[in-house]
Amino acid sequence: MQTNFSENQLKDKDNQSTEKIFQKCVHCGMCNATCPTYGILGDELDGPRGRIYLIQDMLENERKPSKKVVKHIDRCLSCYSCMTTCPAGVNYMHVIDHGRKYIEKNYDRPLFDKILRNFLSKVLPNTQYFKLTSYLVKIGKLFKFLFPKKIKDMMELMPTSFPEKTIKVKEIYPANGKKIARVGKEDDANIDFINNIETWYEEHKKGNLDAILSNTSGCGTTLKDYGFIFRNDKKLKAKAKTVSELSKDVTEYLSENLKLNIQKKNKKYKIAYHSACSMQHGQKVHNEPISLLQKTDNDIMEIPNGHLCCGSAGTYNILQSEIAKNLLKDKVKNIESTNPQIISTGNIGCITQISNGTNIPILHTIELLDWYTGGPKPKILNKI
Ligand code: SF4
Ligand code: SF4
């Protein structure tokens, strides 16, 4: 694709790398075929090719983002299904991240939107705030009829119980940032990214860290992208690259490094595996969790149209609840078509979202593997 950045604009390092990505795009539109929002809304501007065009136009013309452009960019799930489909290897993730950063700097969002995004960026990454909000939501549900629909939908998404800590670890270095980045607060997210990089790099240097494991695939995708995010930062780029190289999804690490001592059960289950977008498209980790689950000797089933998002997508089910509900309905229909007794997945966002649409118990892949390697039977399976 032809680009028209001026020499001056190309002094900006972000423009430089995004221009190279634009140049790879041949406008074939194949990506539209697997884009969930294009599938639902049928608008070219709600597909990856259209969004690339909108972002290019904004950046090259230094255009103030219009309400219409922001609407189409905000509707992107960042599921990266388009990246798996694209034959030209266009890194759409980096284009949409650049587009979101530009919008955050140059667009004045309506007041409610601003308050909501700020609220989410403070509450979601903070356990104490999150628990407090959950408690307030529990009380608020008694007066649900007083709230507008958007708030009611958000209340439904709030979990009412939290898992207990079952293992003691010497020190905890919490990873932060992904959900803040999702609402466009890139500068705030970067502070957390830097803390993570410095802490983990120091531990690695002391020989205390062989790998950084993520059991939440949305976060794992971001950890693996630190090297790119800090590519222009002289002080951090080498450390960020090391941290990205050390980052693995927990199932990826188990497949590569450990022989699991699987204890087979008397009963066989039909388990539908839901491959989270951040896992299959973001990290290209798909076969590893399936192979691990197959070792348990249960029937592991892939879900029809498994490349499509369930609608969770970070904060998407809060900010774009109508599209998210459509995606959830389709996802549950596809899961239930395989008639499973259990659903397994590798992302907590998907667990929350899918459990809002079905009564079939849904577990993290690691919870199942833990049970099959001597851990307790997950309580949620007591009825089956
Ligand atoms: S499939 Fe790739 S090359 Fe084709 S329009 Fe989409 S992003 Fe561009
Ligand atoms: S990331 Fe997902 S929703 Fe966004 S353009 Fe690509 S396929 Fe469509």
Image (spheres, rainbow, N blue to C red):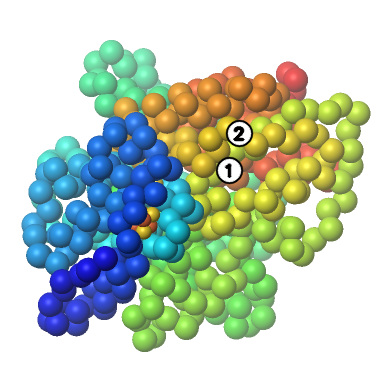
Query: Is residue 377 left or right of 139 when viewed as pictured?
Result: right
Q: Label 1 sits on what residue type?
A: Ser
Identity, as a three-letter code, of the amino acid under mark 2: Ile
Q: Residue at x 44, y 69 (%)?
A: 226
Foreground label between 2 and 1: 2
Residue 375 placement (x, y as % from top left): 80, 42
Residue 303 - label: 2
Image quadrant for the N terminus? Answer: bottom left
> x, y (%) of residue 240?
47, 76
Residue furthest out toward the bottom: 234
Kindly state the secondary structure of the residue where label 1 is placed: loop
226 vs 256, left or right, is left
Q: Is mark 1 within 8 Å of ligand 2?
A: no
Nearer the observer, 214 or 57: 57
Residue under numbered circle 1: 275
Q: Quadrant of the C terminus?
A: top right
| Residue 267 as seen in the image, left or right of residue 197 | right
Residue 258 visible in the current orientation: yes
Report which quarter residue 170 is drawn in.
bottom right
Count residues near mark 1 (Cα–Cα under 10 Å), then give few for <14, some for 14-19, many for 20+. many
At a point 69% along the width and 61% down the height, the residue shown is: 253
Q: Are marks 2 and 1 in contact (CB under 8 Å)?
A: yes
Q: Tell me: residue 247, above or below residue 68.
A: below
- Residue 377 location (% of width, % of height): 78, 33
Indicate which disc, 2 or 1, sits on the residue closer to the N terminus. Answer: 1
The residue lying toward the viewer, choosing from 122 and 35, is 35
Location of residue 322 (image quadrant)? top left
